[in-house]
Image (spheres, rainbow, N blue to C red):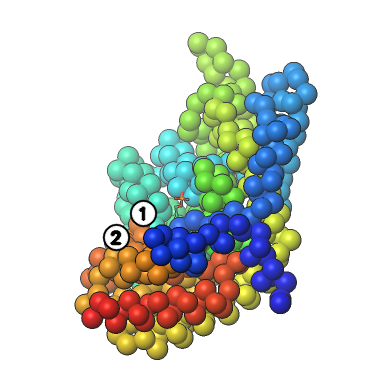
Amino acid sequence: MSDILRERAQFTILRERIGKGQKPLVYLDNAATTQKPLCVEEAAQRYYEQANANIHRGAHYLSRLATEQHEAARQTVADFLHAESAREIIFTSGTTMGINLVSQTLALSGLVGQGDEILVTTDAHHSNIVPWQMLCERTGARLRPIPLTAELSFDFASYEQMLTPRTRLVAVPYISNALGALNPVADIIAAAKRNNPQTLVLVDGAQSTAHLPVNVQELGCDFYAFSGHKIYAPTGTGALWGRAELLEQLPPWLGGGEMISEVSFEKTTYNTLPFKYEAGTPNIGGNILLAEALRYVQRVGLEAIDTHEMALTRRLYDGLAALDGVQILGGRENRGSLISIHVPGVHHYDLGTLLDQMGIAVRTGHHCCQPFMASLGITGTTRYSIALYNNEDDIDRALRATERALNMLR
Ligand code: PLP
């Protein structure tokens, strides 16, 4: 057994039998959220039994211990993303909050103005569309979708034409969640900076962080946001990385708690990075568990994870492509470990429901990508997404079940 296959034992929930039929669980909804390994569960118990207290300003032992663990967790996130410094890591509740933090602070900053342009991909998640629409509403900037090619990949030629002196920000998913496309983010960032070094680039890392090694300094982006729950950590965790000079320049967004330096009724001054952006008591236990999950991923190894997941993805792709009437969104190569299908004449929800009855957990619907679905003229897809603990048996069961379900529905 290859080392990575042994990791399945870390995920107790995968032994569950589900539903009325007590079917063995095949969990292929990892793009929505991943299961949590035992080491994260045990770290939760350790933290709440031995270290729980509010952090900073505490005179007592437990407060110092929790503060130490919390700030060590920040360093773990910084190392994981290859950030220059832990000051550049803002803990958030997930990708959505990270992107909103950037859009809200930009709105307050005056750095985005009337006639500026913000570019996003057509297949972006709503969390990477709506915050920019809100920024546009407040500043008079314009949101422009970058088209996809006929093969549903990033249309680089169109993108380069859309870059102008007015381009203020480009926001792209590293891996798109409805389509699965692995976008050429390094080239996208380089083109934006060539056009205008002042253009900001935000990478939505919600779908990439658990699957690919990320080096924010090498990428050359300005912001990188991700969610803990998609990388084996609890929900309500995540981080935003931003270049220190930008984070220093932007104003804080939420007030109160650790974000202050001095408060008086006349004037309040703000704390230094990263605390300036962390108002209120943070998710202390959650952030410590995020670091535990990142260490877990580092122990398994992102390269091993990628090799394993991509082999399963190709097996799934070939199996789905062989099924009558199944249309796979996007090509076989240059994708993350998720596949969306559309079957003309079959509603995605019906397919998902039948798969559920057979013990297969997939996601159906628009995947928070309504503009992308509208561009395809469909209302949704059935999405299979793979994590490090999936194996060939999961893929083969999902394929057999899909074939059976489609035969029942047609
Ligand atoms: N961006 C992408 C590409 C996603 O897939 C998701 C979640 O599915 C998000 C953003 C939002 O993530 P969260 O709900 O964890 O904030």
Q: Mark 1 points at which residue?
A: 126
Image quadrant in which the N terminus is located: bottom right
Question: Label 2 belongs to which residue?
Answer: 370
Label 1 lies in ligand 1 vicinity (Cβ under 8 Å): yes
Q: Please, is residue 326 above or below residue 230 in the view?
A: below
Of labels 2 and 1, earlier in sequence is 1
Indicate the quadrant where residue 4 lies: bottom right
Asked if residue 19 can be seen in this view, the reply is yes
| Residue plotted at (27% across, 68% down) | 350
Pointer 2 and pointer 1: residues touching (CB < 8 Å)?
A: yes
In the rendered image, the quadrant that contains the C terminus is bottom left
- Residue 375 visible? The answer is no
Closer to us: 66 or 34? 34
For disc 1, the neighbor class at 10 Å (few under 14, some 14 to 19, many from 20) is some
The x, y position of residue 214, in whole percent, is 63, 61
Q: What residue type is labelled 2?
A: Gln
Q: Where is residue 83 in the image (x, y as percent from the top left)?
A: 67, 52
Residue 205: x and y in percent read: 53, 58
Question: Residue 325 vs residue 9: left or right?
Answer: left
- Residue at position x 65%, y 41% from top? 44
The answer to whether residue 224 is left or right of residue 169 is right
Q: Which of 398 and 30 is in front in this view?
A: 398
Q: In this orientation, which residue lies closer to the viewer: 386 or 189?
A: 386
User: What element does badge 2 sit on?
Assistant: helix
314 above or below 55? Answer: below
In the displayed structure, would residue 103 be above or below residue 117? above
At a point 72% along the width and 72% down the height, the residue shown is: 3
Image coordinates of residue 377 in percent, x first then y, are: 23, 71
Within 10 Å of disc 2 (Cα), the crowding (few <14, some 14-19, many 20+) is many
Report how far apart the C-alphas of labels 2 and 1 lie in the structure.
8 Å
